[in-house]
Image (spheres, rainbow, N blue to C red):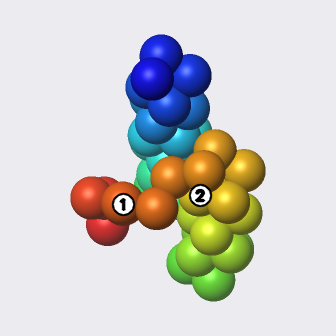
Amino acid sequence: MKNKSVNTASFYYSLNMLRLLQDMNLVTEDEVAKIKKSLSEHYGVTDIYYS
């Protein structure tokens, strides 16, 4: 259970950093979509409540 919580927290932290990079125009919307998919697979997060 603890590992799932850590993975979920890490996933959302990564998404926030990704949003920052997008706001700074350092990554495109297409790149963001690909990275989000990769992050969800890496951290094993299937319920994404972030857009």
Identify the amino acid type marked 1: Ile
Spot occupied by residue 6 in the image (x, y as percentages of width and height): 51, 22
Residue 6 visible: no
Q: Is residue 2 above or below residue 8?
A: above
Q: Is residue 48 above or below residue 34?
A: above
Reading the image, the residue beneath label 2 is 40
Q: Nearer the viewer, residue 23 or 12?
A: 12
Of mark 1 and mark 2, the one earlier in the sequence is 2
Query: Dot 2: within a 10 Å radius of its alpha carbon, few (fewer than 14), some, or many (20 or more) residues?
Result: some
Q: Nearer the viewer, residue 24 or 14?
A: 14
Please state, as top left, top right, bottom left or bottom right, where the C terminus lies in the image.
Answer: bottom left
Residue at image x 27%, y 58%? Answer: 49
Spot occupied by residue 36 in the image (x, y as percentages of width and height): 58, 63
Spot occupied by residue 1 in the image (x, y as percentages of width and height): 45, 23
Q: Nearer the viewer, residue 12 or 42?
A: 42
Q: Is residue 18 left or right of residue 35?
A: left
Q: Residue furthest left?
A: 49
Cα separation, mark 1 vs mark 2, equals: 8 Å
Residue at image x 51%, y 52%? Answer: 45
Secondary structure category for the residue under label 1: loop
Reading the image, the residue beneath label 1 is 48
Identify the amino acid type marked 2: Ser
Q: Is residue 9 above or below residue 50?
A: above
Residue at image x 59%, y 58%? Answer: 40
CB atoms of marks 1 and 2 within 8 Å: yes
Query: Dot 1: within a 10 Å radius of its alpha carbon, few (fewer than 14), some, or many (20 or more) residues?
Result: few
Residue 12 image-quadrant placement: top left
Residue at image x 64%, y 44%? Answer: 43
Q: Is residue 9 above or below residue 51?
A: above
